[in-house]
Image (cartoon, rainbow, N blue to C red):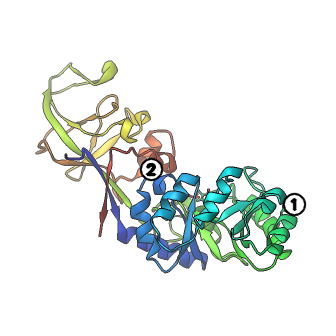
Amino acid sequence: MLARAQALISESALRGNLTALARRAQTRLLLPVKANAYGHDLETVARLAAQHPDVWGFGVAVPREAAALAALKLGKPVLLLTPPTPEEVGPLADLGVRLPVASLAEADALPAYARAHLKVDTGMNRLGARPEEAVQVGLRLAERGLLEGAYTHFATADEPDLSFSREQFARFQGVLAALPPVLAHAANGGGILSFGPLPGLSLARPGLAAYGFAPAHLRQVAPLTPVMTLRARVTHVHPVHPGESVSYGGLWRAAHETTVATVGIGYADGYPRGATGQAQVLVRGERRPVLGRICMDQCMVDVTGLDVQVGDWVEVWGRDELTVTEVAQWGGTVEYEVLTGLGTRVERVAEH
Ligand SMILES: *Cc1c(COP(=O)(O)O)cnc(C)c1O
């Protein structure tokens, strides 16, 4: 059966982004591949990235992702970025998954063959031990021979004002100074682009940036290319006469004779319904408006004057002319949410 929508995953764009980010950070990378590799497909991204010399390993958010990745046997470390439940610790350690640790109780509960990354809360107030407790936990892990790494997470590194990130980093450095040498990591994509190399760090964790996106004020810092192009097929072409409306609610009404193409992508595929009224797509390289409400499985596009046939591809977002950044703005959201919301019906195709 023909997929109505395809996400083309550019291997060369991903490779180039990883190289650029490792160079900017002056470290190897712990590549976040959570949420199906930000919607790009875990297996496709992980297999490709595992070949990249700058990739040390992978970061995932939940145990199921860790297990899926371990099953690929790529020979690269996997770090679970959120706390496992006590029941999950043993099975994850058995799979070789590195575990975050933020308390003495957690440190003591690890099996002797586990590898831990001390999680330090330097101000995000989401996860981790506060710096003063973190030192104790880290020393306990080191005593047990389980301490592989230590990390923290910036709350505002993608913003122009870096003062809070600097405070966070100073707190983290204080903890590192009290520990034996470990694989230390702090910067997400925003942190890498904002700071470049940070003293004492050996890994960096670029998520969105690895997939090709930077905040507007940091776009010049490193050459990044969006990895995904999303395209969908025209499933029907029909005329709409002046005065007639299109789609639910009749929000859009034809002022002139209009040729309308129905396209096989909708909000169930992750095309944000909130973009209704603003959305555009590329038809034969030309920007054309999406007419009326974006539906669950479909949307309608003004293709008047263009030679468009059933089966043609329409570009929903891509690498330069119309990116996810713009689609996210129309939808009142951010690239992260649009990419991770990409539905399972969208076929992922690696482009070599
Ligand atoms: C998701 C995540 C990242 C990546 O963040 P980006 O903003 O996408 O670069 C880094 N570190 C942790 C702990 C994360 O959960």
Q: Residues within 10 Å of mark 1 (few under 14, many from 20)?
A: some
What percent of the width, then of the height, locates residue 107? 79, 62
The quarter of the displayed image where residue 144 is located: bottom right
Indicate the secondary structure of the residue bearing disc 2. helix
Q: Does 64 appear above or below 195?
A: above
Q: Residue, x 17% and y 27% (percent of image)?
A: 256
Left or right, residue 174 beside residue 187 = right
Classify mark 2 as within 8 Å of ligand 1 or not, answering yes or no.
no
Indicate the secondary structure of the residue bearing disc 1. helix
Q: Residues within 10 Å of mark 2 (few under 14, many from 20)?
A: many
Q: Quadrant of ligand 1?
A: bottom right
Q: Residue, x 29% and y 70% (percent of image)?
A: 352
Q: Residue, x 13% and y 31% (percent of image)?
A: 238
Discs 1/2, front: 1
What percent of the width, then of the height, locates residue 275? 41, 36
Instruction: Say which of 155 and 250 sits in front.
Output: 155
User: Which numbered marker is on residue 339?
Assistant: 2
Instruction: Say which of 296 and 102 sits in front.
Output: 102
Residue under label 1, please give it: 133
The quarter of the displayed image where residue 300 is located: top left
The quarter of the displayed image where residue 132 is located: bottom right
First-in-chain label (1 vs 2): 1
User: Which numbered marker is on residue 75?
Assistant: none
Q: Amino acid at mark 2?
A: Leu
